[in-house]
Image: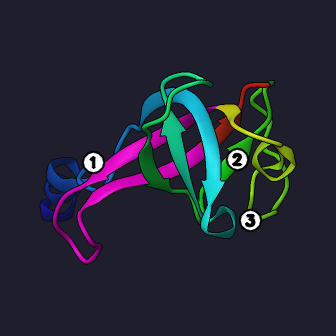
Amino acid sequence: MIAAAMLWAYGDWHSARPRTVEGWALPVHDGAAVKLFDSPDAAEGEGYVIAGADWLGADGARMGDDLVPGCLRAAAGKAHVQLGVVDVHGGDLAEGPRVVFVRCLD
């Protein structure tokens, strides 16, 4: 009974639902990170580490085990993407945003 109560109280403690951000990404640091821009012509962007994130094709299907999403590897410039971002607070990891998936939109 105590175990059931603890599971009920703390069972959802480590779960998170990612927020999505969409924009045009330019790979940096050999594809381990991206700068995300509001438009293809924007000059200022926000940096995100994408190393270890799952990546998805435009149809939402998971796309292999490559470290760098295909749309970012092949892009001659910025690629249209959606990022799934979870904000980490406390715990054993450094705090801040973590990208859990990259979806190639083009």
Which element carries disc 2, helix, strand or loop? strand
Quadrant position of the C terminus in the picture: top right
Crowd class of label 3 (few under 14; some 14 to 19; many from 20; radius 10 Å): some
| 83 within the magenta span | yes
In the rendered structure, the answer to whether residue 24 lies left or right of residue 100 reads: right
Question: Where residue 15 appears, x then y in whole percent?
Answer: 34, 49
Identify whether 26 is placed above or below 6.
above
Which of marks 1 and 3 precedes in the sequence? 1
Query: Residue, x 75% and y 40% (percent of image)?
Result: 77
Q: Estimate the spatial distance between the alpha carbons at disc 3 and disc 2, rounded to whole Å.
A: 9 Å
- The magenta segment: 81-101
Main secondary structure of the magenta stretch: strand
Q: Are marks 3 and 1 in contact (CB under 8 Å)?
A: no
Question: Image quadrant of residue 50?
Answer: bottom right
Which element carries disc 1, helix, strand or loop? loop
**Which amino acid is tagged 3?**
Leu
Crowd class of label 1 (few under 14; some 14 to 19; many from 20; radius 10 Å): few
**Which amino acid is tagged 1?**
Asp
Identify whether 104 is placed above or below 10.
above
Which of marks 2 and 1 precedes in the sequence? 1
In the rendered structure, the answer to whether residue 19 lies left or right of residue 99 reads: left
Say which of 7 and 21 sits in front. Answer: 21
Identify whether 68 is placed above or below 20.
below
Q: What colour-coding does the image apply?
A: rainbow
Question: Image quadrant of residue 24?
Answer: top right
**Residue under pointer 3:** 67
Residue lying farthest bottom?
Answer: 92
Query: Residue, x 60% and y 56% (percent of image)?
Result: 53
**Residue under pointer 2:** 55
**Residue under pointer 1:** 12
